[in-house]
Image (cartoon, rainbow, N blue to C red):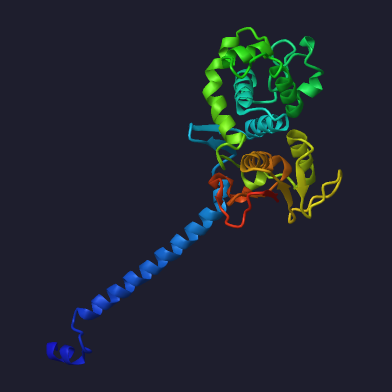
Amino acid sequence: MAVWAREKAGPGEGPDHGGRRRGRRWAAGVTVVLVLLGVGAYTLFQKARPYLHGTGCEVSTSIGKMPLDLEQGANSATIAAVAFRKQLPERAAVIAYATAIQESHIRNLPGGDRDSVGMFQQRPSQGWGPPHKLRDPVESTTKFFNALVKVKGYLDRDLHDAAQTVQRSADGRAYAQHEDDGRLLAAAFTGREAGTARCWYPPGKRAASRRPEAIREMRRAFGSKVRVGGPSPLTTGAASNPGSWNAVKVTNTRAGWAVAAWAVTHAQVYGLTEVRYAGRHWQADAGHDGWTDDKDAREDTVIIQ
């Protein structure tokens, strides 16, 4: 029998070579299954990824990192936008950020101590204006800067001294502890450090596209001199076309990154899906990835979709 087995065996085969071949086939089959499982897992992960990170914003600069929620991110971008409109130096924005952190954690509060209201906890009884205007981040920031520039030598004063002269709070020294965070936010949102602000949220939290309203609100913050073009309509009441886009002309990259940061931090509220600027690209579907490379994104125009 042993001789018959050897005679029937094919070239290179013996009593145990067939078993080896079956083993190789089994291993190859397992490999194919594992590859298919891996591909399926990767595909599932890619589909689930926008839901995994939750909702939030982050600024990451050479100074450090700071997590923000969407409201804090949008309000931070608004402070920088109003500083641009009023042509104020970065130090003014630092003072505003430190003040807003101390007063409200950069949130638009409906109330506070006594009749305090809004991001800077301004009091109608002290002449800041009616509550509904103080609950408007653009209005309240404008009022803060209007008061700050009247403080003699505010750029050379200690931060807590300049802020306290404006706010007239119970303990003005508290503003000093937020100066480093104010510098970090100013570096990101005034555009001094490019592409350092990102926001993300799951697809289920995305609002319907309201790009015309977003552009009008952006111009209200940055000023009416901001030039906006592109095929998407800008008139009040115009229907938004999610597949269209608008182009914001900028005179320098610092202003461009301030506009881009404003668009990213307001994307969830207005249903914006993409922002392109200066070789970078942000997408709502991959917001946690932040700014990725886009060689076609120009430096003189911020594209908002």
Looking at the image, residue 78 lies above or below residue 120: below
Residue at point 63%, 16% (across, down): 154
Residue at point 57%, 57% (across, down): 295
Please state if 151 lies on the left or on the right of 139 as rendered.
left
Please state if 282 lies on the left or on the right of 248 as rendered.
left
Residue 110 is at least partly visible in this image: no
Looking at the image, residue 31 lies above or below residue 222: below
Residue 266 is at least partly visible in this image: yes
**Farthest-out residue, top:** 170
Spot occupied by residue 211 in the image (x, y as percentages of width and height) = 76, 46
Residue at point 62%, 54% (across, down): 297
Spot occupied by residue 73 in the image (x, y as percentages of width and height) = 63, 34
Residue at point 61%, 28% (across, down): 90
Please state if 285 lies on the left or on the right of 236 as rendered.
left
Looking at the image, residue 54 lies above or below residue 168: below
**Occupied quadrant, residue 184:** top right
Spot occupied by residue 46 in the image (x, y as percentages of width and height) = 53, 55
Q: Nearer the viewer, residue 37 or 61?
A: 61
Q: Nearer the viewer, residue 113 or 30?
A: 113
Q: Nearer the viewer, residue 1 or 38?
A: 38
Figure disc tally: 0
Looking at the image, residue 6 lies above or below residue 234: below
**Occupied quadrant, residue 296:** bottom right
Quadrant of the snapshot with the N terminus: bottom left
**Occupied quadrant, residue 140:** top right
Spot occupied by residue 288 in the image (x, y as percentages of width and height) = 55, 44
